[in-house]
């Protein structure tokens, strides 16, 4: 032992918390520069900084560091989806069945359009189906962040929030059903083929129900004070994310259902609608910076045409249904067109679904990433701009908090 045993080893390896701090500050600065210099949404800057620092850019944050920080993506997605789940008004969907029908059919036709186009491009059917399932999702994080930044309120805004939440559910359910096909292809055995999807769906819903029941029980003890409620919810969201990860359930489905069930089961109205404020903004920076770091442009030259075709087919499939059911659901055709544009983003949730699928089926992951991540790279820029454009043209933007 040397006389300088008390000094740290050098060079030392940065841990996940250090990388997180670096990405948080760098992402924040990148977002401010993009917003002020280019008048683009801040989340575009967050993703750009993450990409620049990640393995595909400067390589400061390598793949090992990203693997260590995956938990922060789950936590960020968890908080965002819980807040979105709280905003779901299931009674509105019951009163307006045409709105629910438009949600189901725009997701279904979007799936069919993407699957058909990718098949025509000679993409194998299983790969095309998985890509189409994930492409059903509209990024709730992009929608919620732009809505918050623009202080948007109105018919298009509320439908956009509801449809993005429902699309995430449909994407999870479709991808979970396709796990049966993937198990048949890569593992075999009828037990795992049937039980794996069932475990993911039922397990996620059971965990969400238990978490909402515990939340409401605690709220009866702590009262209606906003500070106490905030601490309880933060603790329970973190615990639920940890439980879902440990049990190998879907963080996406669990937290969205957790937020929705907490509202539905709150018969005594003890739970004030909760927004995470500055904490939510910090988590948004983390999510988009890390999502950007996961992206790679390596497959883009070879997959650019397939990615562009996927984006076009996805938009067309969703737009056709929204136009067709605009009048029955009580929406003007002009606003239906803006709603179609607002559903363009496909970012954080798609990255999570790709990563989750690759973790379970490592033989299949690289092929799925090559098709989808190329489209996500394009939509990291186009998606936030599309939402911002739709909300502004709909006339639903309030006084902009950040002048984005």
Image (tube, rainbow, N blue to C red):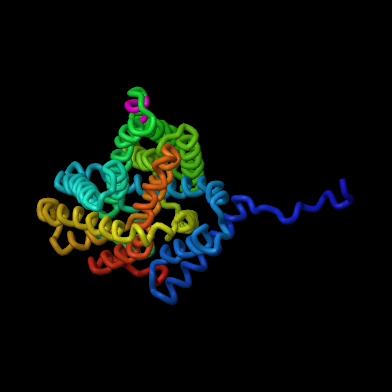
Residue located at (42% from left, 40% from top): 363
Q: Position of residue 161 (x, y in %)?
A: 29, 53
Q: Is residue 310 above or below residue 252?
A: below
Main secondary structure type of the part rendered in magenta: helix
Q: In the rendered image, which quarter is residue 364 located in?
A: top left
Say whether residue 115 is left or right of residue 63.
left
Q: Is residue 47 above or below residue 212?
A: below
Q: Quadrant of the N terminus?
A: top right
Q: Position of residue 289 (x, y in %)?
A: 48, 58
| Highlighted magenta segment, given as a residue range | 192-196
Q: Which residue is outermost to the bottom?
A: 37
The answer to which of 307 and 143 lies nearer the viewer is 307
Q: In the figure, 10 relative to 127: above or below? A: below
Taking the view exactly as shown, the residue that stands out farthest to the right is 3
Residue shown at the point (42%, 63%) measured from the top left = 43
Query: Residue 395: horizontal and vertical position, in percent?
Result: 24, 68
| Residue 179 rendering spot, x and y as whole percentages | 34, 35
Image quadrant containing the C terminus = bottom left
Residue drawn 13% across and 60% down?
332
Q: Quadrant of residue 381?
A: bottom left
């Amino acid at each position: 032992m040397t006389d300088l045993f008390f000094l740290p080893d050098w060079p030392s390896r940065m841990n996940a918390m250090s990388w997180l701090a670096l990405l948080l500050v760098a992402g924040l600065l990148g977002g401010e520069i993009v917003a002020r210099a280019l008048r683009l949404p801040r989340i575009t800057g967050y993703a750009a900084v993450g990409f620049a620092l990640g393995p595909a850019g400067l390589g400061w944050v390598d793949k090992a560091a990203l693997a260590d920080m995956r938990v922060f993506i789950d936590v960020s997605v968890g908080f965002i989806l819980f807040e979105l789940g709280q905003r779901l008004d299931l009674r509105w969907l019951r009163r307006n069945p045409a709105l629910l029908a438009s949600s189901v059919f725009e997701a279904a036709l979007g799936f069919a359009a993407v699957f058909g186009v990718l098949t025509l491009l000679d993409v194998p059917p299983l790969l095309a189906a998985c890509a189409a399932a994930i492409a059903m999702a509209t990024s709730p994080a992009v929608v919620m962040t732009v809505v918050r930044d623009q202080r948007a309120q109105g018919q298009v805004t509320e439908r956009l929030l509801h449809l993005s939440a429902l699309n995430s559910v449909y994407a999870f359910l479709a991808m979970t059903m396709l796990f049966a096909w993937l198990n048949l292809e890569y593992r075999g055995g009828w037990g795992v083929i049937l039980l794996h999807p069932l475990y993911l769906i039922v397990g996620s819903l059971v965990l969400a129900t238990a978490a909402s029941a515990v939340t409401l029980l605690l709220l009866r003890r702590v009262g209606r004070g906003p500070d106490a409620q905030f601490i309880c919810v933060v603790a329970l969201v973190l615990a639920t994310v940890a439980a879902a990860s440990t049990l190998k359930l879907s963080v996406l489905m669990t937290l969205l259902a957790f937020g929705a069930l907490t509202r539905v089961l709150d018969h005594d109205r003890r739970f004030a609608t909760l927004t995470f404020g500055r904490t939510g903004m910090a988590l948004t920076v983390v999510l988009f910076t890390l999502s950007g770091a996961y992206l790679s442009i390596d497959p883009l030259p070879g997959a650019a045409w397939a990615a562009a075709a996927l984006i076009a087919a996805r938009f067309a499939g969703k737009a056709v249904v929204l136009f067709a059911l605009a009048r029955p659901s009580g929406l003007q055709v002009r606003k239906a067109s803006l709603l179609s544009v607002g559903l363009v983003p496909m970012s954080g949730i798609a990255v999570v679904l790709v990563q989750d699928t690759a973790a379970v089926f490592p033989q299949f992951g690289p092929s799925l990433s090559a098709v989808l991540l190329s489209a996500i790279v394009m939509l990291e820029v186009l998606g936030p701009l599309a939402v911002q454009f739709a909300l502004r043209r709909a006339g639903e933007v309030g006084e902009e908090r950040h002048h984005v």
